[in-house]
Each structure stands twice: as C-alpha cells, then as structure tokens.
Amino acid sequence: MSKQQAFKAVTKVPAYQLVEESIRGMIMGGELSPGDLLPPETELAVQLEVTRPTVREAFRSLEGAGLLKRGPRRRMVVTAPSPRIVHNAMHEAIMLHGVTYRELWEINMALEPTAAALAASKITPELLDEIEANLARTAECLDNPAKLVECDVEFHELIAKAADNHALLLAKEPLGELFFPAYGTVISNIGPGERLFEAHTKIFQALKKGNEKQAQIWMTKHIRDFLRGCELAGVNIDAPVNSNV
Amino acid sequence: MSKQQAFKAVTKVPAYQLVEESIRGMIMGGELSPGDLLPPETELAVQLEVTRPTVREAFRSLEGAGLLKRGPRRRMVVTAPSPRIVHNAMHEAIMLHGVTYRELWEINMALEPTAAALAASKITPELLDEIEANLARTAECLDNPAKLVECDVEFHELIAKAADNHALLLAKEPLGELFFPAYGTVISNIGPGERLFEAHTKIFQALKKGNEKQAQIWMTKHIRDFLRGCELAGVNIDAPVNSNV
C-alpha cells in the first residue's frame, strides 16, 4: 500500500449549508431574534465572502425550516417557526416509519388526560363557553357520524387550547390529526355517540368546577373507550397509520 | 375605481416548490416508498417540463425535510425522515416561542410515567441489564454532579427505548434534551443524589417485576421531585427555556 492511500477523502459541505448553519446558530443563540431584519442578499454575500446564489439558497432552506420569512422590500425577517413546521415533520416521520394506531393511542393516553387536568386549573370563561356550545352541537348530531367526528375533534382541540401549554400543543396536534381515519371508522361503525357525549359532558362539568382529578379520570375513561370502540368496530389498531383501517 | 383595479395579484409559487410538493405527495401517498430511487435530475426535468436547477432545488428542499438522501451514482433515494428532523423542528419551535421549563415539565409529567408503565410490560432482558448497569454507575457518582446528570439522562433514555413506542420517542427526546440545563443546576445545587437513586432503583425493580402500576407511580414521584428540586435550587421554572437558569 502506498502512502497516498492513507489520505482520507474530505467531506465537502456545500457553501449554502455553511451559511445556513451560521445564520441558524445566530438565531438559536439569541443574537438574532424573531422580527429582526437580515441584511440584503448582496450585502450578506459580501460579508460572508460567498456568491449571491449561495446566500439565496441558504435563505430558502431557512424559510423551509420556518426560521425566516420574506419581509418588507424582499428582505428576510427572522421568525419563530409555526406549529405547522413541527406538525409536518412529525406527521411525515410517523407515516414513513410505520408507526401504528396503538402507538399513537398509547401517547394519547398520556397527553389527553394531562391536557384535561391542566385545562381544569387554567381554563378561561371564554373557552368554557366555547366547550358548552360544542356540547350543544354534539347533542344534536349523535346519529350523524360525519358531524360527530367534527364535534369530537373540536372538543379535544378546545381542551388542548385550555391547557395553555405551547409544548403540549406542538406534540399533541399532529397525533390527533393522524387519528382522524380511525375516529371516522369507529364512529360510523358503532352507532350513536351517547357514550362519547356522556364522557364529554362529565369532562366539561369537571372543567367548570376546576376539578383536575375528575377531568383527568373522565378523559382517561374516554380515551380507553376509544380502544374498546376500535375492537367493536373491527379496526385493526396494530396496523400502521399509513394504511387504511 | 376603474375596472382594471378589480384584478387581484396572482400569488406566484416558485416552480421548485411545485416539484417538491408533487414528489412529497407521491411519498406520503405511498406511490414512492423508502428505498426507492428517483430518476436522474435530467430525466425528471424533462418529464416535469422544468429546468434542471429547478429539480435540483426541489431535491435539496426534500433532503432538508429528510425525505430524500443522496444514493448510488448521485441518484436520489426516498428515506423515512430521521428522528433528528422532528427533534430539530421541535427544538427550534420551543426555543423561539418562549416555552417555559414549567410547560416542558407538565408534558414530562404526562410522558415519563407513561413510558415507565409501557416499559414495565415490554422491556427486554437486554434493556433490563443495561438499566441495571446504569444503576451501578449511578451509585458510584452520587456526589459528582456532572456524571450524575449523564447517568440520569441515560436512565430516562433507556426507559423510553424500553417503552418501544416510536411516536413516544419522537415526542419525548427533544423535550428531554431541552431540560439539560435545568437538570445540571438542580443536581449541582441540591447535593448528593440519594433521592434520585432511590427513585431510579424503585422504578428498576418495578420494571423487573413487570409491575406497570408501580413503575408509573415511582416515575410520577420522581418527576414531581424534580419540580421540588428546582424550587430548592432556586431555579425559576417559569423562565423560558431559551434563558439561562
């Protein structure tokens, strides 16, 4: 073996990625904050000693990550990523890794009762009114699966909102959405939603009284019921979320 | 007002985003699966009636989202996004939205006990051995804050692994990492980790017996203790995660 063979190939990192990492580092390190304007493309290219297309490429990548958006006079503005970004990343990972409905349900068993307990201690009168209105609409569509699914999803979204925890919203929202197909099947196959309505009513009453324990207990029952509903409706909850159930 | 003014500006979507959405749609719809090779850039450009740089741009964006990676002979291969992608998206959103330690703690109170309960029913002999080895190392560093934090983090990672739920790992990992600075402060300020060691031991014993209830109860106590530790150590848990505590 000649000495030359001892040299290792250098891993080339594209210039735009270096620019991207540098800007990302400044944002995450607090040197740049949401709302701050970046210098124009040409100016930044001179400062960083790269070409203008390289800067543009880095901007696009950071736009994709939700850390920049186009602001006044085509200048880039630093932004806090919208929940959509986390949502899509999680959605894609769950779909492509073959995560099953049971795995999602196990997490819902952790997050939903916690959301209900937090909501009981933090809910505002406005959100209590919204949940009451949601219950009234739910009562009217117990025999209409499509509308009932809609009301049910809204109910859980209102609870998550009332829990007033941004990290919880980030984690919970994509999981809820991925459940929709199963909700639909369960609700259309096992008929009128009286059991669902009873659980929602008990949870609402617990929130109204600020009773964390009761809110948590009833939400746990409600989520456990869903698993039973899947069995009754013949939904295979060990199937991956990306299949039809 | 002249009639001309009634025309609305057309929102221009860049061509690369159209290409990106089309490929993403094929992946999420199952027409393309992880492992599939995409046609070469030039061929795809002809098929889609766009330029080659447009295709390249779409590829880069999908690479950033973890849906493509470079494969043999520079062809693109469809991939399932690595947990890192979700991790980074959540990390950035939490940092930039000013989420507080308390909000993260509230979610940990939901996810950690659930992980422990799941682990009790699913843990493998290999992972039980790893946790036992982790406990032995923990016992030796109760007075060494830096090493104790390391052992603690590893303990919780092993439990999450034992819970064998991919969605839980996706949601839990970034939350755990964001807690590190607070762990460090609490552990160095309140001294020897006997209380932590006792909780870890009880959890291990519950896992060994396959006792879900006990695993959940002890993990709940352990996470609640952390909040008490923050108070004793003077950590302001209502501060945003992006500040120093």
Image: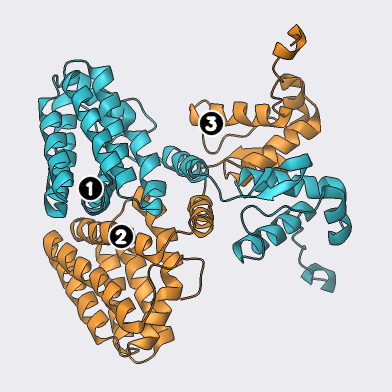
Chain colours: A orange, B cyan
Q: Are marks 2 and 1 in contact (CB under 8 Å)?
A: no
Place residue B97 in its image quadrant. Answer: top left
Q: CA distance from mark 3 to mark 1?
A: 35 Å
Place residue A195 in its image quadrant. Answer: bottom left
Which circle, 3 or 1, is nearer the viewer?
1
Name the side, left or right, on which A21 lies relative to A91. Answer: right
Front residue (pair B199, A121): B199
Inspect the image, locate mark 1, and give the three-letter code of the amino acid beneath it.
Answer: Ala
Pinpoint residue B74: horizontal percent, then vertical percent.
77, 40
Number of callouts:
3
Q: CA distance from mark 2 to mark 1?
A: 12 Å
Tell me which numbered mark, 2 or 3, is placed earlier along the sequence: 3
Residue, disc 3: A27
Name the side, left or right, on which B224 lies relative to B15. Answer: left
Chain of the residue under the numbered disc 2 shown in the image: A
The residue at the point 21 percent across, 76 percent down is A199
Chain of the residue under the numbered disc 3 shown in the image: A
Residue, disc 1: B116
